[in-house]
Image (cartoon, helix red, strand yellow):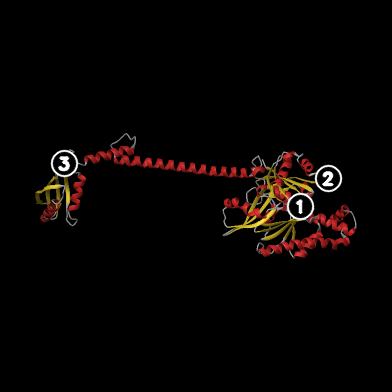
Amino acid sequence: MPEKILGLDISNNSIKAVRVTAGLKGYKIADVFLIDIDKAGSVEEALKRLFENEAFRNSVCVTSLPSGSFSFRNIRLPFQNRKKIDKTIAYELEPFLPYSVDDVLIDYMVVDQGDQSAIFATAIPESVVGDLVRRLDECHVEASIIDIDAVPVVSKITASSDARCGLLMDIGHRDTTAILFRDGRVFHIRHFPFGGANITEALAGAAGIEFSEAEDKKRAGDTGETVEKVSTVCRKFFLEIKNTLEFLKLKGELEEEPGGIFLTGGGALYQPLRDEMESFFSLPVEMVDISTSEDIGMEKVIMEGLNPMLMNQALALATREAKKGVGFNFARERFKPKRVYEKFRKDFKWVAALALIVLCVFGINLYMDYNYSRARLDRLKSEITSVFKKTCPDVTRIVDPVQQLKVKITLAQQSSSGLNGTGFGTKTLDILKDISRLVPRTTDFLITSFAFDGDTVKIKGETDNFNSVDGIKSELAKSSCFRNVTISSASLIKKGNQIGFDLRMEVARN
């Protein structure tokens, strides 16, 4: 069953929600929801309307908090180990926080690591997170992840863009969040009190009309002679951003100019704002549309009613990866969800599928190894039986050929000590070894008969002359195995010129 995930974007004037189903091929947008908080009466009432839909209430909830609620700081620590960073980061931030370190939640990203760790850290009062958790709890909903504003949008941009360094601006109704990123990592976030309402107010003041009428004219693009007044307001905002970039350069935190500006949020829908921005910064300005990502699909009826600039953040939250390091998460400590949603069930399915594949491969490998070992064992048993039959053809009943052959060898070794077993430790093989060792290789010596009765060794042999017979006798007399080596007879053999002789040797007792 596909996983249901809800991306919930709560701004100061509206609530945007996108529900997706996550499957093996990616995400599919199932529902979108947009409600004006003023029309609903309050944030609580707007959330109640949202969660009246059971599909939204029974989904894994991923949400965020506005950047204006956070404190941000770039710091460096002289080590890389995350456990050490976790233990020391609160002490490093404490001098720069406007509230007690005991009353805040802290999270961070490692921007760069060399001899030192460059860290982008952020802190927020626990009370702010607690208010959000309480509101969701009243609707019987738990947030599995609480990120910062448009940070998840950055992950989507870097996944589909070649920009090494860029600036994302989420321009809302009254606030703008500017996020600088490099190599896919956020390294600076700043909140500006500027939004689409500032442009509308400038239009209303220049034209002398009501705010609501000016809003309608802005959306219709009917700004007329008020464009210059609007440009003045926009340039003032752009100058603040430019000053921020210059300040970061002086501190050495911004090593290169952003390659482009990426816009999202309802305030960025005003075309003159985009034109003025492109002219002021001399950088390409691109409107973000996360819904066009290859791994996100939707029905045609949803596509027709979806405004990407308004729903980008909610969609980025819904499709945000759950693994550590892709963003921030303040659903922690006492705000950690009671139900274990830190890892989406989709991740568990992937792990389970991978584990099943590994087990199947392991099982197949084990089965093949077993079959191979069994076949090899059967072949070895067959060869052992064949060798035994050739070695001991007189044995008809074969039970354990290895053990039976060991018995045969033991009996043969015992019998090699002599015919009557009285050789006092001298074995036939020892006698033959001594004869072979003592008689020179150059001597023509052929043994035609050998007899050993335990006390005496009798040898009949042939050699080339009588001198050789004496030489053989003399050499054998040197053996510690024999005593009283005598030549019983020596005569010329009729065939050839060989000398036949008989030797008699008494075995020395140990």
Q: Label 2 sits on what residue type?
A: Lys
The disc at residue 161 is none
Between 250 and 90, the one nearer to me in the picture: 90
Please tell me whether mark 3 sits on a helix, a strand or a loop: loop
Nearer to us in this view, 388 or 418 = 418
Give the mark nearer the N terminus: 2 vs 3.
2
Badge 2 vs badge 3, beta-carbon distance below 8 Å = no
On screen, residue 197 versus residue 81, left or right, reads: right
Q: Disc 1 marks which residue?
A: 308
Asked if 91 appears above or below 60 in the picture, the reply is below
Rounded to the nearest whole Å, what is the CA distance between mark 1 and mark 2?
22 Å
Relative image position of residue 202 (x, y in whole percent): 85, 58
Residue for badge 3: 454
Residue kind at label 1, given as amino acid type = Pro
Quadrant holding the C terminus: top left
Q: Which mark is residue 39?
A: 2
Question: Which percent across, then down, holds residue 111?
Answer: 63, 57
Residue type indicated by callout 3: Gly
Towards the viewer: 248 or 476: 248
* C-alpha gap between disc 2 and disc 3: 122 Å
Categorize mark 1 by other alpha carbons within 10 Å: few (<14), some (14-19), many (20+). Answer: many
Asked if residue 221 can be seen in this view, the reply is no
Of circles 2 and 3, the one toward us is 2
